[in-house]
Image (tube, rainbow, N blue to C red):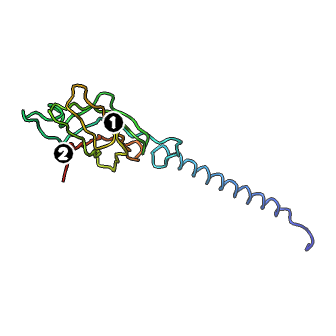
Amino acid sequence: MYGAPRSSSPSRRRRQLRRALTVAIAGVAVLVVVLLILIADGVLVLPSHTSAPVTISYLQVRVIEGNTSGGMPWFGVGSADKNYTDGYPLQVAPGGTFHAALFFFNYDNVTHSLHSVQASTAPTQVVNVSSTTPSLPLPIPPSPEGQNFIVYVTVPSTPGATYVLTLTISAVQTP
């Protein structure tokens, strides 16, 4: 009586093990379903190897300039505020460099110089003018040939964002 082994003990352990495995599998299945729902709803985003590009909708150039003795702006009618849409929208890697190629004609009878360039965006983000070619100050003599001017801008680092880029170029030297 005391020495006889119980036969129900191994089967009870098997049932407990099966029950524990069933509960664990059901728990993992529920977790997988919840994760899939979060991914589908966009709450949980899977990592990507590439960031979405920054989009520049168009380029707006504002030139701060004076007028000739005849009342015309130094760099021509319409030079003070111009929108460039040809070739836009343009996509750049987040935090990457974008360049705007511009051309200036001086319609006055004296040389005027470009002194500074500032970049801004709408909506407002930090952008930097990294360099210009040729460098500033850039004298633009009266000439029918004109002057090429390239501005290099570091775009914001927000992946997938869309901006209007504004370059403000000053040809008026501040004291």
Dividing the picture into quadrants, the one containing residue 168 is top left
| Helix, strand or loop under label 1 | strand
Quarter of the N terminus within the rendering: bottom right
In this view, which residue lies farthest toward the left?
70
Residue for point 86% across, 66% down: 6
**Residue pictured at 47% horizontal, 42% vertical:** 51
- Position of residue 8 in the picture relative to residue 153 (left or right): right
Residue 172 - label: 2
Front-lying residue, 162 or 30: 162
| 43 left or right, relative to 77 | right
Q: Position of residue 72 (x, y in %)?
A: 10, 33
Where is residue 68 shown, x and y percent of the image? 10, 35
Against 80, is 24 above or below?
below
Query: Which is nearer the N-term, disc 1 or disc 2?
Result: 1
User: Residue 7 location, x and y as percent?
Assistant: 86, 62
Q: Nearer the viewer, residue 139 or 157?
A: 139
| Residue annotated with mark 1 | 150
Q: Amino acid at mark 1?
A: Ile
Name the image quarter holding residue 155. Answer: top left
Report x, y in % for residue 126: 33, 50
Q: CA distance from mark 1 to mark 2?
A: 19 Å
Residue sitting at x 91%, y 68%: 4
- Label 2: state its secondary structure: loop
Compared to residue 17, the image places residue 70 above or below, namely above
